[in-house]
Amino acid sequence: MPPAIRVSAVLLCCLSVSPALAEPPQPKEQIVAISFDGANDLAQWERSRALARRTGASFTYFVSCVFLLTRADRGIYHPPGRAAGSSNIGFAPSREDVAWRLREMWTARLEGHDIASHGCGHFDGAKWSKGDWSAELRQVRSIVRDAWRINNIPYEPAGWKEFAEKGIVGFRAPYLSTGAGLDAALADNGFLYSASGVSRGPETPFERNGVVQFSLPTIPEGPAKRRVIAMDYNLYVRHSNGKEDPAHADQYEERAYQAFRAAFERQYDGERIPLQIGFHFTLMNGGAYWRALERFASEVCTKADVECISYRDLARLTKTQAAGHEAPGN
C-alpha cells in the first residue's frame, strides 16, 4: 500500500466520530519507525529500498551532506568553529559516487521515503549556539540544492531544488548530541522534527518549540536484559567492544533480532507507543544487525495492524493529533 494511503489509514483511527455513528473501539495500529544514519554506501541504499518494497515500509534516511562533496570541493563546507573543508567522516571518493547517491536519494524520495539530514561533517554540536546550528542547517540545504552543479552531473531532476529547500524536514544530530539552540534553529530553517533524543523505553512523540521530538528508546537486550539504545552501533559496541568479530556474527544477529522483537511485542500487546529503531549503512560484525533488521521488518511490517512509516509521516500524524483533528462534517 502506498505510504500516503497507509498514513491516511493510521489517521482515520484517530479521528472522532459522532456518538450516533460510533462503532466499538478498535485497537490502534502499532507504528514502527526505522531509520538510517549517514546513508553513504550505495549498495545499502539498494538493499534498504528492496527491503521496503518487500515489506511495504517507508524509511527515513538521515543523509550527511559531506557525502555529496568530493575532497576537491570540500572547501565549500564551513563547519561551525572549524576550518573550511573539515569533516569527521571524510567526503565522497569521486563525482561518480556522488552521482549514484543523488540518484538513490531522488529515487527513494519518489518511492515515498523520507530524506532527512544528519548535518554535514558529523560534528558534536552540544556546545553550539543557535547561530552555529543555523549555519550548519543552511549549508545542509545549499549543498544538497547545488550538488548536481557542484559535481558537474547532468540531468538534475525537475523539482530537486524545491526538494532541497522545502522537502528536507527532519534532522538527527550526530552522536545524538544536541545544544540549547537546536530547536529554535530547526524551526527557523523549516524543519518539522528532530530525532535526536534517547528515552528509557519507547516514548510518545511530542512537540517542543514548534518541532516534533523523537527519541530512540533503550531496550532490554541479551541474557541479562541490560538496556541498550535501539541502534546497530550501540549493539556493536555492546557485543564486541566496537571491533569486528565475524566468528560470532550469527549469535549477534540473533541477540539483536530477539531484542527488537521483544521490544515490538511489548508495545504491540500493550500501549502501542511507536517503536523507533536506528541503523547505519555500515555492515558491523559481518552484517549481523542488517540481517536482524531484515528478519524483523519482514515479520512485523507486513502485519495488517502495523505501519512501518517514516519519521516525516509520523511527525505529521503527531501534529494532526495535537491539533485535535476531527473527521470532515463533524
Image: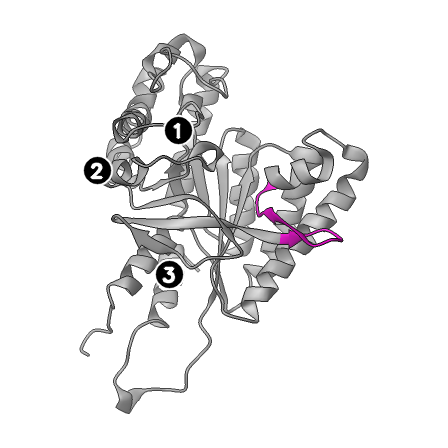
Q: Which residue is mark 3?
A: 7
- Disc 3 crowd rating (10 Å Cα; few below 14, some 14-19, many 20+) is some
Measuring 29% from the left and 46% from the top, which residue is drawn there?
A: 192
| Residue 201 falls within the magenta-colored stretch | no
Q: Position of residue 105 (x, y in %)?
A: 41, 35
Q: Position of residue 151 (x, y in %)?
A: 36, 16
Q: Which residue is mark 2?
A: 188
Question: Split into 4 quadrants, where in the image is the C terminus?
Answer: bottom left
**Which residue is nearer to you in this view: 47 or 35?**
35
Residue type at mark 1 is Gly
Q: Which residue is mark 1?
A: 125
Q: Position of residue 311 (x, y in %)?
A: 40, 49
Q: Nearer the viewer, mark 1 or mark 2?
A: 1
The relative height of residue 320 versus residue 211 in the rendered view (above or below) is below
Of callouts 1 and 2, which one flags the residue occurring earlier in the amino acid sequence?
Answer: 1
**Which residue is nearer to you in this view: 158 or 125?**
125
Label annotation for residue 141: none
- In the picture, residue 236 is in which quadrant? top right
Residue type at mark 2 is Asp
